[in-house]
């Protein structure tokens, strides 16, 4: 291999040339891809409720209704004049007080008369009377003495030793047949037993007024009864047709 020649000297450094002008801006590059959406943040605390606003102003008061007209006051009557006071009469003179008379001598005490003899005892009274009544209106077609739907009325008395009594039967009665009769008698039971008979009965003959209730009564003096408790009971019958009886009563009075 040949020998290396010596290195030549470095030449002087030339001066830097002036900077050239800036070239025109190049076109914008393409838009990069959109980044992913970040996580939703935590919901903040709800704020405290605000202070209530002031109350609204009070509405105006409605107008007052008109006062009605006052009625006319009547005129006052004239006051009568006061009569004159009469003059006071003079006081009369006081009369003189009379002298007190002398007290008379006390009379002698008379002798006591003899006691009279006791009068004879009167006859003993009888036991009390009795009576009964039935107001219900009821009918019968029985031609022999019998009870109505409501039995009686009846009365119980104590017959005295005389064996006598006064019996009164009363009723409003009629018969629906113009030629028929309605009869109210009485039967006796107890110390004495007797059947009802026409001879001791209150009788109503209808005649031409068969629709009218006839109020009446009959009184009988009954003798020959046995002393003791005895009951008198009203009984009823018709001669024919239908008899109607109302306001029925019986009264018995024992006689001495």
Image: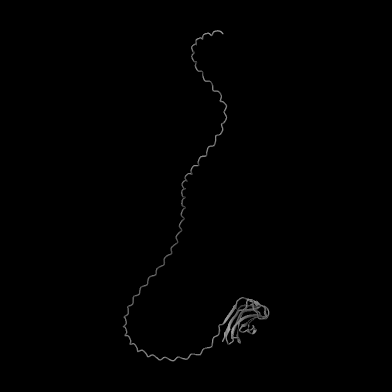
Q: Relative to 37, does residue 124 appear above or below in the rendering?
A: below
**Left or right of 105 in this view: 207:** right
**Left or right of 185 in this view: 42:** left
Q: Residue most toward the front?
A: 1
Q: Position of residue 57 (x, y in %)?
A: 46, 48
Q: Position of residue 29 (x, y in %)?
A: 56, 25
How many badges with numbers are in the image? 0
Q: Position of residue 253 (x, y in %)?
A: 57, 83
Quadrant of residue 185 within the rendered picture: bottom right
Q: Relative to 220, does residue 39 appear above or below in the rendering?
A: above
Quadrant of residue 220 within the rendered picture: bottom right
Quadrant of residue 241 within the rendered picture: bottom right
Q: Quadrant of the C terminus?
A: bottom right
User: Closer to the camera, 126 or 201?
Assistant: 126
User: Closer to the camera, 153 or 77?
Assistant: 153
Q: Quadrant of the N terminus?
A: top right
Q: Is residue 250 visible?
A: no
Q: Is residue 139 visible?
A: yes
**Left or right of 232 in this view: 21:** left
Q: Position of residue 42 (x, y in %)?
A: 52, 38
């Amino acid at each position: 291999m040949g020998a290396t020649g010596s290195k030549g000297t470095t030449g002087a450094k030339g001066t830097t040339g002036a900077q050239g002008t800036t070239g025109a801006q190049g076109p914008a590059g393409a838009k990069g891809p959109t980044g992913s959406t970040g996580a939703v943040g935590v919901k903040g605390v709800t704020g405290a409720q605000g202070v209530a606003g002031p109350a609204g102003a009070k509405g105006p008061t409605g107008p007052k209704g008109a006062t009605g007209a006052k009625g006319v006051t009547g005129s006052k009557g004239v006051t009568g004049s006061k009569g004159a006071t009469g003059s006071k009469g003079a006081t009369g003179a006081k009369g003189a007080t009379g002298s007190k008379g002398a007290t008379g001598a006390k009379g002698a005490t008379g002798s006591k008369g003899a006691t009279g003899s006791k009068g004879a005892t009167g006859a003993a009274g009888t036991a009390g009377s009795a009576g009964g009544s039935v107001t219900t209106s009821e009918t019968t077609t029985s031609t022999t003495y019998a009870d109505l739907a409501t039995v009686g009325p009846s009365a119980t008395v104590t017959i005295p030793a005389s064996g006598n009594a006064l019996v009164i039967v009363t009723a409003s009665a009629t018969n629906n047949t113009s030629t028929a009769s309605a009869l109210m008698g009485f039967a006796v039971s107890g110390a004495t037993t007797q059947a009802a008979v026409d001879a001791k009965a209150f009788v109503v003959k209808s005649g031409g007024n068969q629709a009218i209730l006839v109020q009446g009564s009959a009184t009988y003096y009954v003798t020959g009864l046995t002393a003791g408790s005895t009951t008198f009971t009203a009984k009823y019958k018709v001669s024919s047709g239908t008899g109607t009886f109302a306001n029925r009563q019986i009264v018995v009075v024992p006689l001495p």
